[in-house]
Amino acid sequence: MSRPAQVFRVAITTLILGCATSAAQAFLNDEEARKAIVDLRNRVTLVEEAGKAKTAELAAANAQLVEQLTALRRSLLDLNNQLETMRGELAKLRGNDEQVLRELAEMQTRQKDVSQTLDDRLRKLEPVKVSIDGREAVVEPQEKRAYEEAIAAIRGGDFDVSVALLANFQRRFVGSPYTDSVRFWQGNALYGKRDYREAINAFRAFVTAAPDHPRAPEALLALANSQAEMKNPTAARRTIEELTKSYPDSEAAKAGKERLASIR
């Protein structure tokens, strides 16, 4: 029994006993007094039962309240756990977002590098404009490199290599804008390696194919020199005559006239 219920019961009992004592003293032998005492006892019983009922009701309410509080504590704990889980997931998502942003930045950098590399490679494959013996033309990059490599060999005095490179050029790049110039320099390379017979053929092929080429007069003079080296002065004189007749105002024609005097 709770402390308030005990106090309440003691107070009621004291009150009843006090009343009973007074009634007994006044009406000890009186029937009505006895009835009053019985009535008071009945009232006490009713009050006690009411108090017990109230106490039970309070206990039940208290138990229900405790149960509700327990349920609320569990719910609060569950909510806290869910909140911690959500915080963890949010942190993870933020970390993933940062990782995604880093990977995106790296991907953009790689894409830029690849694009630059691709542009560089495409630029290397794009046709380029060049000047060939004073004439502009459009050639492929590898075509330009092959020609320049052969010319560099001539300038370096490596005539055997130059002859091979120029012959290979003619096979690889048929119809190239460099073709006439290749024939001219091939004759010079052959002359440089003292292969005068082939030099004559190369110079003649050049002049026949491109009589209006700026280097045609030089080719005829080189052809005459090759014939002179072959101990064929008659052919050399005829070639110089052809030079002075076809290109009378050229520097090569003037040099040919001077050379004519030394040909025996």
Image (tube, helix red, strand yellow):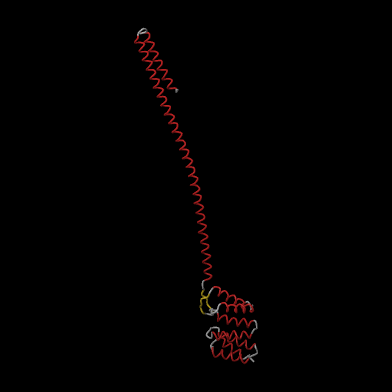
How far from the left and from the top, in percent, is residue 55?
42, 24
236 on left or right of 114:
right
| Name of the residue lying farthest toward the left | 32
225 on left or right of 43:
right
Q: How many marks?
A: 0
23 on left or right of 113:
left
For this rendering, which residue is in front, 63 or 158?
Answer: 63
- For residue 64, above or below residue 245: above
| Image quadrant assignment for residue 162 | bottom right
How far from the left and from the top, in percent, is residue 35?
35, 12
- For residue 188, above or below residue 56: below
How far from the left and from the top, in percent, is residue 94?
49, 49
For this rendering, which residue is in front, 177 or 14?
Answer: 14
For this rendering, which residue is in front, 124 or 261?
Answer: 124
Quarter holding the C terminus is bottom right
| Name of the residue lying farthest toward the top | 29
Quarter holding the N terminus is top left
How far from the left and from the top, in percent, is residue 186?
60, 81
For this rendering, which residue is in front, 2 or 120?
Answer: 2
- For residue 31, above or below residue 12: above
